[in-house]
Amino acid sequence: MNDITPAQDEVARTEADVQAFRETMEAIRRGLGRVIVGQDAVIEQLLITVLIGGHCLITGLPGTAKTLMVRGLAQALGLDFKRIQFTPDLMPSDVTGTDILDEDPAAGERRWRFEPGPVFTNVLLADEINRTPPKTQSALLEAMQEASVTARGRTYPLVRPFVVLATQNPIELEGTYPLPEAQLDRFVFNVVLDYLDAAEEVAVVDRNVLGVVEEDVTPCTDADTLLGFQRLVREVPVADAVTRYAVDLVRATRPDDASSGERVRAYLGYGASVRAAIFLTMGARARALLAGRYHVTAADIRALVPAVLRHRLQRNYLAESDGVTVDALIADVLDGVREPG
């Protein structure tokens, strides 16, 4: 006679899924560690992006291994990968695809055929996305939000999982265009990729000089398994107080909200939308699971706040003239909102 109740059976399955998740994520981190030196926090945020089915913007100067990191992550995940080099002359159809008129001489007929663009993949690297004008940047809007592409009145669904990992150079560099606000808001994170410390740079130099640089990462999972992990992340419980904490942090970025601080009201033109609170709670679920926990804490929310908010807050002219950065204002918000007890 089987004495295991349905509830116990469900708990056992969840524990097995969590264990498989931990082993796979650890294998991915080890694999990326053979290709990328340091940048552990960035890799974690990229994994969180994939695990919640979102998109990530990676900001960094040339030579900080942005492209190498994205390619290695796609290989480790065992997903189809395509890369678009964004340039000033890139057209929207170069991203999404286009209709081609085929002619059949034997039948004397002409038919339209849709030729899919590189956006039809699992992991799309939009390399240097801010080197193309806003018209072409906006070609990704529907794909990022609806996971589909519309051409000549017909809608074509994208494969899942679908993740856009876009790199950009700091907007102060020559030949760059600011991304439209609507597109920025579709990115879960804006991850800033900084220079390595001295010891890590020595390791990079030694690897390249000695010719021991590894460019390929062994796949650790596949599309179907990853979709299962995404469902597992959504099941991680979040206490009401933690959800309210995420909402309070987002509301405190809005200059016209009663909870905002003096510097926010003085230096921000507008704050973050509710999408930021959604991404905070979703990302915190994945972060907790990556840390081996099946519950979300306020610390998970706080850790993700800078990357979630920095591309959603618009400074005004006074902030620019006074040299007040977005990250400094985010720090004010974190200091001003009380954590749940």
Image (cartoon, rainbow, N blue to C red):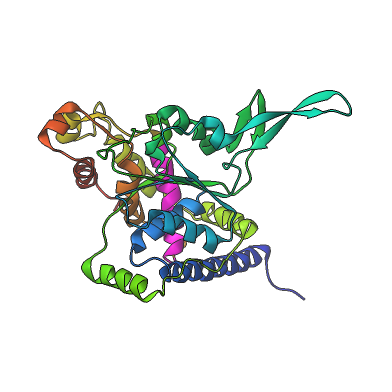
Q: In which quarter of the image is residue 11?
A: bottom right
Residue 237 position, x and y percent, is 48, 54
Residue at the image position 53 percent from the left and 68 percent from the top: 24
Count up the numbered dots: 0
Q: Position of residue 341 (x, y in %)?
A: 29, 53
> Would you say residue 240 is visible in this rendering?
no
Q: Is residue 286 magenta?
A: yes
Q: Quadrant of residue 266?
A: top left
The image shows residue 1, relative to residue 13, as above or below, that is: below
Residue furthest front in the image: 105
The answer to whether residue 162 of the structure is visible from this angle is yes
Location of the N terminus by quadrant is bottom right
Q: What stretch is highlighted in magenta?
A: 275-292
Residue 143 position within the rendered picture, expressed as x and y whole percent measured from the top left = 55, 36
Q: In this view, does 323 lie to the left or right of 179?
A: left
Across and down, in percent, residue 84 comes to: 50, 44
- The answer to whether residue 174 is left or right of residue 31 is left
Residue 340 position (above or below residue 13): above
- Who is closer to the viewer here, 44 or 237? 44
235 relative to 63 in the view: left or right: right
**Residue at position x 50%, y 35% in the image:** 140
Viewer-nearest residue: 62 or 17: 62
